[in-house]
Image (cartoon, grey):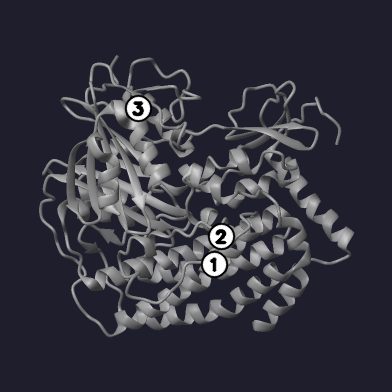
Amino acid sequence: MLSELKTRLGGTVIAWREKSQKRHYVEVSPVDIVAVTGIMFKDMGARFQIATGADTRDAIEVLYHWAFDTYGCVVTIVVRLDRANPELDSISGLCKGAEWIEREMWELLGIKFRNHPDMRHLLLSDDWPEGKFPLRKDYSRAN
Amino acid sequence: MSKKTTIVPIGPYHPLQEEPEFFKLHVEGERVVHIDIELGYNHRGIEKISEAKTFEQAVLLVERICGICSTSHPFACVQAVEDAGDVEVPVRALYIRSLIGELERIHSHLLWLGLAGHFIGFNTVWMWVWRYRESVLDVFELISGNRNHYAMFKPGGVRRDIRNEDIPAIRRMLKGLDGPIKLFRDAIVQDPVIHARLKGVGTLTRQQIIDYAAVGPTARASGVDIDVRRDHPHAAYDKVEWKVITAQNGDVFDKAVVRIGELFESMKIVEQCIDWLEKSPGSIDANPGQIKAGEGIGHYEAPRGEVIHYIRSDGGNRAVRHKIRAPSYVNIATNRESVIGQSVSDATIILAAVDPCYCCTERMAAVDAANGRRVLSGDDLIRLSREKTEEIRRELGLPGPELALEKALRRLG
């Protein structure tokens, strides 16, 4: 299965890190995220578990965790976004299961998801101050 | 019921006040045409808090995400930490983990069964099921000191051992449950009133499950054969005999059937675990030191479906990122499909069918689709649900499962 996946992903793979047989972390370019999602979800039939947004010092990362239940492994697709302007295409058009987590990653980390069908607050109140993203490392409750 | 524009006063709240409903059903007459799902009322910022806790503290923190499936989060969390740190857990701890997890599944599914009974008007079923559930909570109190929040998990193993002198009590509990659960199963699965009430209600297709990435009994009831315990073996699940329960129709009835079937499988697993534990002493804690820098994913089949934790460590004693996704997060979204076009008297049981991990009954309301004014409160919706069962009982001229069930349960003593 992994060799089929590697073949299908082809040149979109920037780096492939196999932590163990069950855990793979595959970095791709943000511009390829919709195509890669199509490969994972439609071609390979993986199950979307969730996406993790993470603020690091030099980038904002989005990790998409995909389960291959028949093979007992998780392949995580990683994209790194510019911290100053983190933008990414929404994958919810392909995978409805991603709709809510993209809303959550926007409101907690400030990632803009292009073409999201219903971008609005999920967890935070509607009057949450703009531009304040709680999961950012430089978030401060002080104004 | 004609198209309503009257506002029904609800409880202590002013009827015109903007009440933030969790589930706001838009109705035209009796049909649900739209649903608003508003999340976030219980958002406590746990992922952020976890960054300020040590790994061991984080396990106790995440246990409090949920009261009913409280051990599921620690289960996934410790596995994420162990995945990141390449920690090997002693086998006795693996068996104890599965024991705790399955005991929890039993009382969680019993809770749901009772609630489902309550929502469709069988309060006797509710009370009896919860009475038997008490025996599981008593076992938890015996082995962990608590009826909920057992604090059994730690990275590297478990915090408490299971004493051999406590095992007979667990066996007695299993024995005491077996007869009644078989009665509940037969009463529910064979009753024509329940059939008429729950079959074909709130159906989710296989494709909808896949599109929404739904998990757990919600998915398995629609024939999607996934279960983290089997698919991604961990703890003792690949060391004991048990099977995954699925159904094909994806309606509320099938979701009940799946959960009832899982009760028996869980009891089987518990029995095998205590048989093994009784004769296999050993270490219960690998006592890992530092968790090296890296990342880990831990997932587990909570009663409601897959719970997944992702942890990133920088070699320190706390996570720099801790992502948590409970099963209800993906399952609740399926309500956008399962409740649309259905009757408002089925709304309560459909929303309850994914077994959402909180009490949603105060958080439901129905509004007129034309003008958004609230027409039915959560209590009204439950009342309508019960009235529908009454109607079916009358139409069929049948009593429903309660009287026969109660007689049989009393005979068991």
* The quadrant where residue B380 appears: top right
Name the kind of residue labelled 3 in the image.
Leu
| Residue B164 visible here | no
Left or right position of B113 against A95: right
Instruction: Report x, y in % for residue B251.
Output: 64, 54
Q: Quadrant of the N terminus of chain A?
A: bottom left
Q: CA distance from mark 2 to mark 3?
A: 34 Å
Left or right position of B300 against A60: right
Discs 2, 3 touching: Cβ within 8 Å = no
Residue at 47% in and 31% down: A93
Instruction: Report x, y in % for residue B411.
Output: 69, 83
Q: CA distance from mark 2 to mark 1?
A: 7 Å
Q: Which residue is mark 1?
A: B133
Residue at 59% in and 80% down: B179
Q: CA distance from mark 1 to mark 3?
A: 39 Å
Name the kind of residue labelled 1 in the image.
Arg
Which tag, 2 or 1, sits closer to the chain's start? 2
Q: Which residue is mark 3?
A: A108
Q: Is residue B86 above or below residue A90?
A: below
Q: Element type at marker 1? A: helix
Q: Element type at marker 3? A: helix
Instruction: Report x, y in % for residue A140.
Output: 26, 21
